[in-house]
């Protein structure tokens, strides 16, 4: 089953071939659009975020995003309550959206499964049972507990939710090496995500921009009526 995370690679390569700049993407100078809710996660303005907002709102991904937002209420309260208890940014809800579209049966070629797309080793590392008889990754509450524990660990390691999200998607040791090579240290800031943008795997380059774009849409009231072309 294809999820947004699994097709970011293809979309990223297509976009790079047609419109992406030849060097590291440029942060936008203008302030982000006014939101109806206060942000806890950094809402950094960037051209790739704007690109995904447009694609999700009026482009070829709109129908898919409509289905994601339709499924979100089933899990939103549970996930947000767990984020609050852990004092983590509530916008990390949208990481689950870009991973799986809130589909508990979503799976990937890398054997990731569930709404948080945990691979078996990571799931077991954080207490989930995954074997031939049971797979707790498809349990929304248990998988959320495991995913948030992992994200909390990644934040403590990298010092940035953006970089933590990149590590969640691309692998913590790979991102650790990239950060050390590019900045001289594993720990950094959210702005460092765009400093290491070119060194990240293609699908991860647009992972955080897509998450922030989904959060912008969700926090401003959801998908507006489509713009007629």
Image: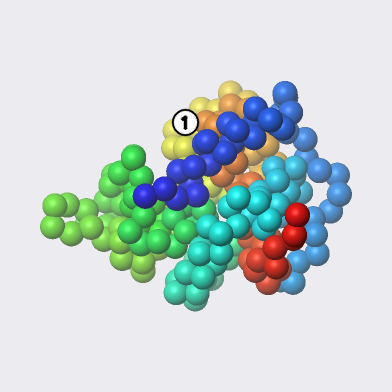
Would you name the residue on which mark 1 appears?
174
- Image position of 43 with respect to 226: above or below: above
Extreme right residue here? Answer: 30
Total number of numbered discs in the rendering: 1
How crowded is the residue under tag 1: few (<14 C-alpha within 10 Å), some, or many (20+)?
A: few
The answer to which of 225 and 137 lies nearer the viewer is 225
| Residue 134: x %, y % from top left | 18, 59
| Residue 41: x %, y % from top left | 65, 58
- Image position of 80 with respect to 149: above or below: below
The answer to which of 28 and 176 lies nearer the viewer is 28
Q: Residue at x 53, y 47 (%)?
A: 165
Residue 152 seen by the camera? no
- Quarter of the picture holding the C terminus: bottom right
- Secondary structure at badge 1 equals helix
- Image position of 151 with respect to 89: above or below: above
Give the colouring mode of the picture: rainbow
Q: Residue at x 60, y 50 (%)?
A: 60
Report whether 65 appears left or right of 3. right
| Residue 88: x %, y % from top left | 55, 62
Q: Residue at x 75, y 59 (%)?
A: 228
Q: Residue at x 65, y 51 (%)?
A: 59
Report whether 111 appears left or right of 180. left
Extreme front residue here? Answer: 229
Residue 130 seen by the camera? yes
Extreme left residue here? Answer: 133
């Amino acid at each position: 089953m294809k999820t947004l995370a699994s097709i970011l690679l293809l979309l990223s390569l297509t976009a790079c071939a047609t419109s992406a700049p030849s060097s590291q993407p440029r942060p936008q100078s203008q302030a982000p659009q006014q939101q109806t809710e206060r942000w806890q996660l950094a809402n950094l303005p960037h051209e790739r975020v704007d690109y995904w907002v447009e694609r999700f709102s009026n482009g070829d991904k709109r129908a898919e995003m409509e289905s994601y937002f339709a499924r979100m209420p089933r899990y939103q309260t549970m996930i947000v309550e767990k984020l609050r208890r852990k004092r983590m940014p509530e916008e990390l809800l949208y990481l689950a959206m870009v991973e799986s579209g809130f589909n508990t049966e979503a799976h990937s070629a890398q054997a990731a499964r569930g709404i948080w797309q945990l691979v078996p080793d990571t799931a077991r590392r954080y207490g989930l049972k995954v074997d031939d008889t049971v797979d707790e990754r498809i349990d929304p509450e248990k998988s959320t507990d495991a995913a948030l524990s992992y994200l909390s660990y990644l934040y403590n390691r990298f010092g940035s939710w953006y970089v933590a999200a990149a590590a969640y998607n691309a692998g913590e040791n790979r991102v650790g090496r990239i950060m050390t090579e590019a900045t001289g240290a594993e720990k950094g800031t959210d702005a460092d995500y765009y400093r290491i943008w070119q060194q990240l795997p293609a699908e991860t380059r647009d992972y955080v921009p897509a998450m922030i774009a989904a959060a912008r849409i969700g926090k401003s009231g959801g998908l507006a009526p489509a713009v007629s072309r």
